[in-house]
């Protein structure tokens, strides 16, 4: 059997969108078991307020992940801007491997850089400032030490605030900055980048020092459909669920 690697991101799973959860659980049980590896590039959950949160559908998803990793499919999770508080306990419970904000993998012989994508949106200075603050150990320890109910309310407030801010921001500010893309790819010595976050699925071709480079932008899942980037030794295809 030829090796197959799957990439998804931006499912934004939440209690309010049960269709996406259902499709994802089905995907984990059937489609993902055929692959050797599944990479989740962030924003799997619309909000994550700590590994101790028992809110549905977290428990079901945890169990399905566990079944998948036990069946032999390696699962990797990279944090997004919504679920960056997902932690060690969740990964230990499910057998998932946690990846750093930037990860380089060998994808069918080519060094490939993986990231959620928010770090590439360097034109959005207020967001980057919040990101830096919220990624300090002090900030995270402080948040995670609050009672669950407080964290739940705070997450709602953040989501609402981010919705208000986004309405005021221009479309270009919320996309990646191409200079940052090239710099980060050079730093990691990669000519292929896969990310999500912007909800602008596409495959961009460009040059880095005269070498052809590619940037794959994964699609966000919706109530109606979900996309998976599938790689095998023959190349890639985008599968619609
Ligand atoms: Mn995101």
Image: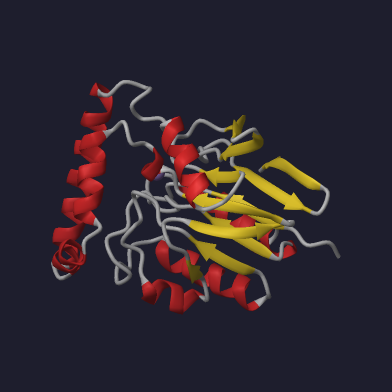
Residue 204 visible: no
Residue 18 is left or right of residue 75, and the answer is left
Q: Where residue 224 appears, x then y in whole percent?
A: 56, 35
Closest to the observer, 104 or 26: 104
Residue 237 visible: yes
Q: Quadrant of ligand 1?
A: top left
Quadrant containing the N terminus in the rendered view: bottom right
Name of the residue lying farthest toward the front: 209
Q: In which quadrant of the rendered view does residue 74 lie?
A: bottom right
Q: Where residue 168 appears, x then y in whole percent?
A: 23, 22
Closest to the observer, 163 or 29: 163
Quadrant containing the C terminus in the rendered view: top right
Closest to the observer, 130 or 163: 130
Residue 202 is left or right of residue 41, and the answer is right
Q: Where residue 103 appears, x then y in whole percent?
A: 50, 59
Residue at 83% x, 49% y is 234
Residue at 46% x, 45% y is 184
Q: Is residue 4 above or below residue 190?
A: below
């Amino acid at each position: 059997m030829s090796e197959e690697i799957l990439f998804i991101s931006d499912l934004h799973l939440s209690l309010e969108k049960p269709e996406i959860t259902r499709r994802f659980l089905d995907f984990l049980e059937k489609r993902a078991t055929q692959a050797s590896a599944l990479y989740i590039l962030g924003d799997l959950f619309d909000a994550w307020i700590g590994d101790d949160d028992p809110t549905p559908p977290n428990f079901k998803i945890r169990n399905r992940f566990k079944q998948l990793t036990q069946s032999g499919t390696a699962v990797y999770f990279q944090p997004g801007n919504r679920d960056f508080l997902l932690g060690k306990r969740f990964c230990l419970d499910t057998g998932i491997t946690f990846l750093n904000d930037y990860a380089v993998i060998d994808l069918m012989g080519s060094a490939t850089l993986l990231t959620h994508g928010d770090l590439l949106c360097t034109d959005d200075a207020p967001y980057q400032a919040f990101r830096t603050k919220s990624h300090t150990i002090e900030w995270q320890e402080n948040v995670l030490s609050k009672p669950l109910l407080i964290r739940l309310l705070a997450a709602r407030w953040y989501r609402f605030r981010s919705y208000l801010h986004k309405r005021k921001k221009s479309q270009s500010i919320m996309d990646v900055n191409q200079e940052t893309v090239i710099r980060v790819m050079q730093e990691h010595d990669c000519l292929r980048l896969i990310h999500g976050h912007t909800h602008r699925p596409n495959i961009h071709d460009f040059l880095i020092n005269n070498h052809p480079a590619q940037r794959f932008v994964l699609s966000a899942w919706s109530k109606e459909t979900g996309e998976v980037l599938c790689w095998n030794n023959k190349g890639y295809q985008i599968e619609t669920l």
